[in-house]
Image: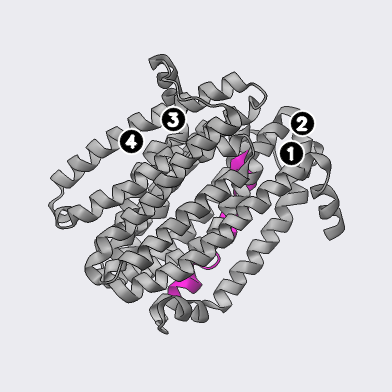
Amino acid sequence: MIKQIKKYLFLPENNKLVSNFFSLSVLQVAGLILPLLVFPYLILVLGVEKFGLIIYAQAIMSYFVVFTDYGFNLSATRDISININNKKKIADIFNTVFFTKIILLLFSFIILIFILFIFKSLQSELLLYFSSFFIVIGQSLFPIWFFQGVEKMKFITYLNIIAKIIFTGLIFLLIKEPSDYIYANLFLGLGTIISSIISVYVLYKNYNIKIILPSFKQIESEIKNGFHILLSSFSINIYLNTNIIILSFFVNPLIIGYYSIAEKIMLILRQLLSVFSQVIYPHICKLVQKSHSQLILFYKKIYIPFLIVIILLSILLYLLADMIVLLLTNTNNLDIVNLVKLIAFVPIIVCLNIPAYQTLLAYDMRKSYSFILSLGSLVSVILNFLLSYYFQAIGTCISIIITEALITLGLYLVLEFKNKNYSLFTLKNI
């Protein structure tokens, strides 16, 4: 099996795929190492409660990040990948998406001010929330969707590593006491903003992309086309980040801190799924233009070995939970260890849905994809309120497991029964 995989991977047409996976894997190694340095330091200097406040603010900002992204990481990536040989077209796509995101960014800031004005419970941390908005600015300006579309993941790697190094350096240099917690998210945002500025120069230098104001009709069309992806992105964000917000209704900041640490540990492994998805998605968009049988062959050769790796890593996370928690928090906190063990196998469930959701999007079946994720987010909110009330952080973890399982099942049901021509299991397609 290993020989067959090597033979398939190193075919000339797949060299770019291998290179992209390697580039993003390097990024993930940096993404794994730097949090291992930063998280223990923040927890030690700020305390678990302040760390919980930082993560809570990030959860709120994540909604604005999703809104300003507007699903472009999927829709714009697809558009660029299928027009990669048309330089004028990809320049038009860049400018339309770029200015659409700026408009959405300004609108997001107005909404943030309105929210902070309405909810008095948030007004005690105004500086934290305003400084955290720099995360939204940085994520909005960074054109990861463009580099994915042209399949140049090395640029994403370089620029993200720059952002992480800046963030890490600022944390260690300037955060020295608990009152400095308000700057943590600011530094995270500044790192990404600097990388975003560099990325615009890279696009100009390598792709001759010049910033030109698009027409109102182009922006309007982009907003309409991305609406269903926006709904699905919001749905993903709801069941990923609303957990902390709902949990905060029933527990104190210390428990939120415990859950945040456990979730961060699990998300480090889950980031590998993001890398895999980002790398193969543009390639899948091209394969569906050729034949469905080639798509299935690709999944058999590439996806199955990756799934096996994720299963093994999840098992290791479960077995080494005690050691990992001790390393990150410098304590043998059994509450955190139990939470880590409970959600250690969530990445496996998420990995199982990658072929289904990427196939739906590659064939432009956005409504079906959006419907399943919207339904999943609704289930997630209901489960979170019920289980968090009775079981606190453990209930939150259980709701994550159930939600991910239902979404994975739903995506395959839609693909296999509503869109039988695109089945991933029917023998006639192989």
Instruction: Look at 44% across and 40% down and name the residue there.
Output: 197
Classify mark 2: helix, strand or loop. loop
- Percent of width and height locating residue 78: 59, 32
Cα separation between marks 3 and 1: 31 Å
Residue at image mark 3: 98
Badge 3 amino acid? Phe
Residue 105: numbered disc: 4
Quarter holding residue 168? bottom left
First-in-chain label (2 vs 3): 3
Cα separation between marks 2 and 3: 32 Å
Residue at image mark 2: 291
Residue 295: numbered disc: 1
Q: Nearer the viewer, mark 3 or mark 1?
A: 3
Cα separation between marks 1 and 2: 7 Å
**Magenta span covers which residues?**
338-358
Q: In the image, is 90 to the left or to the right of 54?
A: right
Badge 4 amino acid? Leu
Q: Nearer the viewer, mark 2 or mark 4?
A: 4
Cα separation between marks 2 and 4: 39 Å
Q: In the image, is 260 to the left or to the right of 293?
A: left
First-in-chain label (4 vs 1): 4
